[in-house]
Image (tube, grey):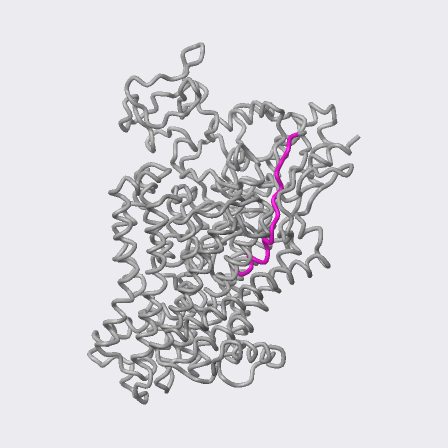
């Protein structure tokens, strides 16, 4: 890697290391039940919301009631978004004249944004109206993020708390939005606009170019969507190409700002967890595992991309010099260069954002594999807002169980015994996503409706299909975009995969939390396995790699590994 | 469940009003006070007419689509037919796709019958990795026996002009560079958005002497202009140094 590549990576690590614990402290104050900064402004807004909803924010529910509320909210949100997209051509605020979205594409898009996946089978510029984006997609991006954080809070209360209940969904949702996502979004958007991101209600303008031709100049409320796309680990952009578009991501600075918006909050949520359970070392152990995986896959990809495409003719210089960014620049912007692009794009792949600033399909096999692996490991580096925390807690339970078997002790996590009922749920959780990915992926490779959408031949084509299912089932939403995905087959199956990949894990995580809620907390003895030290962190890392690696290894052999060695 | 559904509906109606309309309007309002130029798209006007945006690349071609030698040329673009502002897009071609890198021996070469082959049967003297085209100009990546190909007068295959090796040949020719010159990678690859406003410094410098010759300007003056128009890294270490093509070409007009 070049010096500037290392500098940018170091910058991201350093800023996150400072910002995430601070934000984590704020979150712990907000969700810890006591007084919190900003009460004077936020409390009245919250009280008004509770009155409108006619709920008592202090009442705490069982996991079943909590899960039902999440599902009910998901159902109503999906229906509303579906209606907005279906009717957008007839609604106001449509200066670019986008038509109504067809039924299957509306289904796919609605599910995609409600689940926080943000898989986009439509082109933002021409196929979505300003109203559809603003009042439909952006609202879904806010709620998807807030739902993720709420579920994580409930899971933490169940796993670590003394009570049999897990909290109140409406109160969690309201507080997440009022105190976290909305204020941070306003600040984040203004920084982006200052750098050049667009925020206007103007439709298409026509410019007469210097050479005498004409060019369409797009507009739109872009920055307000861009920020929650990132902060909410959603990933869905106003324009078709996302973060590569100069109107969304205008400079080398916004490129790194965008990555920080994605990863700081999920890390902060883990720090919040440490404070809420009163065991900050536990949070550190988890953060260490997440950070190791994050740095691992980004460094591999940055290295591969700056090294360049081995199939490039010798007449083209891919060397990094003071006058050329060099590297594999197909599908990448000059202002980001190969390393800035790989850092941002692959850095968001360990979260459910999957926000890209370059074309993954044109990455080298190793560079693209970095993104692929981050997704296949279950998105815990550092994961989505909230989703990252409950996913890694489930894996921690699995690790405790395996470790307990190895040394012959009853496994315990945070003082609570892990027994058969919990392990059944944990295994169901771990297997849900691979089953969905492998079943739909295989079906697409044998059915004409599936394989006819492939753009690039050979090993790479297989990656296009399997990546699509791995990406959407993990709520990531990034794509090897050569795949022609706006077909009835893909709109339907990818939509179903997104629903299963989001809501089944949520219900299972809540069920696990519910089964531990109110369980007796055993005092620590010398015989207790320490889950907050470096030994456990290494063990957890191993379990994550083995679980993810073994399940998907054949798929990776036939995809990126084959492409790398055979061509 | 009914209780949850009713609360969901109330919540969503409220959120749609507050987050769907209130929030973007608030952001737009504040940005119009402080960053109006940026919020509107960093538009550039000349003599009162819109020329484009400093952030969007544009084509510098004649009506036939050929590059105009008096202007610095941007990168190849996959946005529509090139730099179409309403169809941003990348090529999405994989790193070994013959449409991108040509038929590279040992990687993706096929024989005349379409079966894998050790060497490229379509190789020409100028382009050993040549991808042939049909008479209509469509590139052929999966040959079948009996396929008709376009040929030059000397019997050599006509190559797909959009592969990187062919772009490199055209770039050297257009800029009067020797056959041994290495071409900067950004000059022959399409960007992620298809609207990349920038080129690398190396790419701009390689074009400088051609632009100076056509405009009858001293080469040193154009080179100095390239350096003046170079935008360094943000905060000295974020991103890459770039040259904005539209701004550079606008500045050319003020030389002399």
Please say whether residue A148 is one of the residues in the magenta stretch: no
Image coords of residue A415 (percent x, y): 32, 84
Work out which quarter of the rendered image holds the C terminus of chain A and state it. Answer: top left
Please give the range of residues in magenta. A213-228
Front residue of A527/B214: it is B214
Front residue of A93/A46: it is A93
Front residue of A256/A53: it is A53
Q: How many labels, in total?
A: 0
Image coords of residue A498 (percent x, y): 36, 57
Position of residue B251 in the picture relative to residue A243 (left or right) = right
Point 26% across, 71% down: residue: A425
Task: State whether residue B205 is above or below residue A6.
Answer: above
- Residue B242 visible? The answer is no
Image coords of residue B30 (percent x, y): 69, 61
Please say whether residue A226 is one of the residues in the magenta stretch: yes
Position of residue A259 in the picture relative to residue B127 (left or right) = right
Point 62% across, 78% down: residue: A41
Position of residue A399 in the picture relative to residue B162 (left or right) = left
**Residue A421 position by quadrant:** bottom left
Image coords of residue B222 (percent x, y): 71, 32
**Residue B196 position by quadrant:** top right
**Residue A506 position by quadrant:** bottom left
Outermost top residue: B153
- Residue A59 visible? The answer is yes
Position of residue A257 in the picture relative to residue B208 (left or right) = left
Task: State whether residue B53 is above or below residue A44.
Answer: above
Outermost right residue: B256
Front residue of A386/B172: it is A386
């Amino acid at each position: 890697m070049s010096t500037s590549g290392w500098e940018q990576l170091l910058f991201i690590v350093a800023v996150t290391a400072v910002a995430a614990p601070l934000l984590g402290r704020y979150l712990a104050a907000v969700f810890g039940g006591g007084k919190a900064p900003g009460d004077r402004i936020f409390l009245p807004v919250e009280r008004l919301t509770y009155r409108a909803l006619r709920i008592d924010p202090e009442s705490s529910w069982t996991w079943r009631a909590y899960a039902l509320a999440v599902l009910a909210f998901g159902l109503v949100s999906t229906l509303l978004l579906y209606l907005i997209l279906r009717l957008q051509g007839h609604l106001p605020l449509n200066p670019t004249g986008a038509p109504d979205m067809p039924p299957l594409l509306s289904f796919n898009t609605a599910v995609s944004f409600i689940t926080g996946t943000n898989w986009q089978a439509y082109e933002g510029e021409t196929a979505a109206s300003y109203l559809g984006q603003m009042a439909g997609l952006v609202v879904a991006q806010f709620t998807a993020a807030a739902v993720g954080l709420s579920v994580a809070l409930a899971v933490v209360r169940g796993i670590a708390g003394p009570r049999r209940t897990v909290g109140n969904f409406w109160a969690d949702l309201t507080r997440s939005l009022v105190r976290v996502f909305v204020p941070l979004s306003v600040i984040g958007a203004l920084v982006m606009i200052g750098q050049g991101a667009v925020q206007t209600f103007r439709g298409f303008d026509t410019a007469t170019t210097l050479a005498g031709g004409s060019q369409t100049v797009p507009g739109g409320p872009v920055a307000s969507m861009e920020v929650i796309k990132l902060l909410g680990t959603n990933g869905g952009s106003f324009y078709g190409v996302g973060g590569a578009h100069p109107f969304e991501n205008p400079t080398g600075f916004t490129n790194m700002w965008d990555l920080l918006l994605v990863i700081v909050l999920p890390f902060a949520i883990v720090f919040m967890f440490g404070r809420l359970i009163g065991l900050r070392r536990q949070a550190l152990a988890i953060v260490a595992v997440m950070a190791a995986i994050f740095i691992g896959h980004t460094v591999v990809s940055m290295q591969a991309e700056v090294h360049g495409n081995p199939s490039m003719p010798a007449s083209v210089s891919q060397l990094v010099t003071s006058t050329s960014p060099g590297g594999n620049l197909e599908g990448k912007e000059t202002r980001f260069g190969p390393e800035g692009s790989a850092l941002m794009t692959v850095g968001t792949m360990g979260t459910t954002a999957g926000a890209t600033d370059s074309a993954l399909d044109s990455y080298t096999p190793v560079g693209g594999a970095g993104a692929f692996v981050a997704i296949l490991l279950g998105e815990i580096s550092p994961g989505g807002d909230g989703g990252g925390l409950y996913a890694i807690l489930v894996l921690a339970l699995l690790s405790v169980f395996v470790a307990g078997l190895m040394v012959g002790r009853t496994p315990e996590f945070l003082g609570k015994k892990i027994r058969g009922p919990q392990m059944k749920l944990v295994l169901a959780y771990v297997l849900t996503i691979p089953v969905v990915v492998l079943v739909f992926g295989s079906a697409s490779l044998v059915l004409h409706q599936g394989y006819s959408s492939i753009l690039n031949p050979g090993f790479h084509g297989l990656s296009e299909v399997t990546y699509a299912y791995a990406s959407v089932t993990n709520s990531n939403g990034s794509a090897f975009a050569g795949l022609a995905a706006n077909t009835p087959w893909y709109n339907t199956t990818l939509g179903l995969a997104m629903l299963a990949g989001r809501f089944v894990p949520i219900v299972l995580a809540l069920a696990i939390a519910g089964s531990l809620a109110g369980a007796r907390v055993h005092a620590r003895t010398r015989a207790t396995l320490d889950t907050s030290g470096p030994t456990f962190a290494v063990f957890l890392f191993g379990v994550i790699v083995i679980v993810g690696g073994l399940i998907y290894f054949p798929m990776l052999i036939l995809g990126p590994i084959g492409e790398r060695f055979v061509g | 469940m009914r209780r949850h559904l009713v609360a969901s509906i109330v919540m969503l109606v409220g959120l749609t009003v507050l987050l769907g309309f209130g929030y973007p309007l608030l952001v737009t309002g504040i940005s119009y006070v402080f960053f109006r130029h940026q919020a509107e798209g960093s538009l550039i006007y000349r003599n009162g007419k819109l020329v484009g945006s400093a952030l969007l690349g544009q084509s510098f071609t004649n009506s036939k689509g050929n590059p105009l030698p008096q202007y610095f040329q941007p990168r190849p673009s996959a946005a529509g037919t090139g730099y179409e502002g309403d169809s941003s897009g990348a090529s999405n071609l994989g790193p070994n796709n013959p449409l991108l890198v040509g038929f590279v021996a040992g990687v993706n070469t096929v024989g005349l019958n379409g079966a894998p082959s050790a060497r490229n049967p379509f190789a020409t003297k100028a382009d050993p990795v040549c991808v042939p085209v049909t008479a209509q100009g469509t590139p052929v990546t999966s040959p079948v026996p009996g396929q008709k190909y376009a040929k030059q007068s000397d019997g050599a295959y006509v190559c797909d002009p959009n592969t990187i090796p062919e772009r490199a040949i055209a770039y050297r020719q257009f800029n009067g560079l020797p056959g041994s010159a290495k071409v900067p990678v950004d000059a022959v690859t399409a960007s992620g958005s298809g609207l990349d406003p920038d080129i690398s410094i190396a790419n701009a410098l390689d074009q400088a002497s051609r632009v100076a010759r056509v405009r009858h300007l001293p080469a040193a003056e154009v080179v100095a202009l390239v350096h003046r128009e170079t935008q360094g890294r943000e905060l000295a270490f974020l991103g890459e140094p770039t040259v904005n093509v539209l701004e550079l070409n606008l500045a050319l007009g003020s030389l002399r």
